[in-house]
Amino acid sequence: MLQTVQAKCYKAAMDETNENWYWNADRVVNYSKRISELMGLDIPVEQSINQNFTIVREVPQGWLVPVEAEA
């Protein structure tokens, strides 16, 4: 939804006949900032490194079984 509105504001900002193009350009910048915040693009590298780990502390009994190698 944000990207759709951003695209419309961008189109209005690039229209040379639009007298209020600067307002639309400001909206494009604000939408871009909000989208990057929601997507997590502004997270510092130190924090983003640990975002992709899943820690398994306990496995229910019977979930893991030995695998026999083929001869």
Image: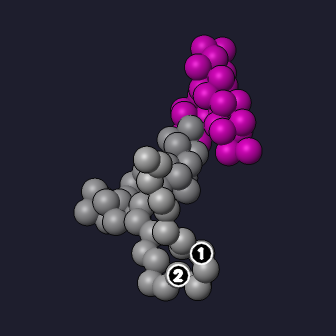
Q: Residue at x 72, y 36 (%)?
A: 4
Label at residue 63: 1
User: Where is the N terminus found, in terms of image quarters?
Assistant: top right
Region in magenta? 1-27
Residue 59 visible (yes or no)? yes
Q: CA distance from mark 1 to mark 2?
A: 7 Å
Tally of numbered discs: 2
Residue 11 on the magenta segment = yes
Tell me if label 1 and label 2 are in contact, CB under 8 Å: yes
Q: Hey, what amino acid is under mark 1?
A: Trp
The residue lying toward the viewer, choosing from 30 and 47, is 47
Q: Hey, what amino acid is under mark 2?
A: Val
The residue lying toward the viewer, choosing from 29 and 22, is 29
Q: Is residue 49 above or below residue 24?
A: below
Left of 50 or right of it: where is 3?
right
Q: Is residue 52 above or below residue 21?
A: below
Quarter of the figure with residue 25:
top right
The residue lying toward the viewer, choosing from 46 and 18, is 46
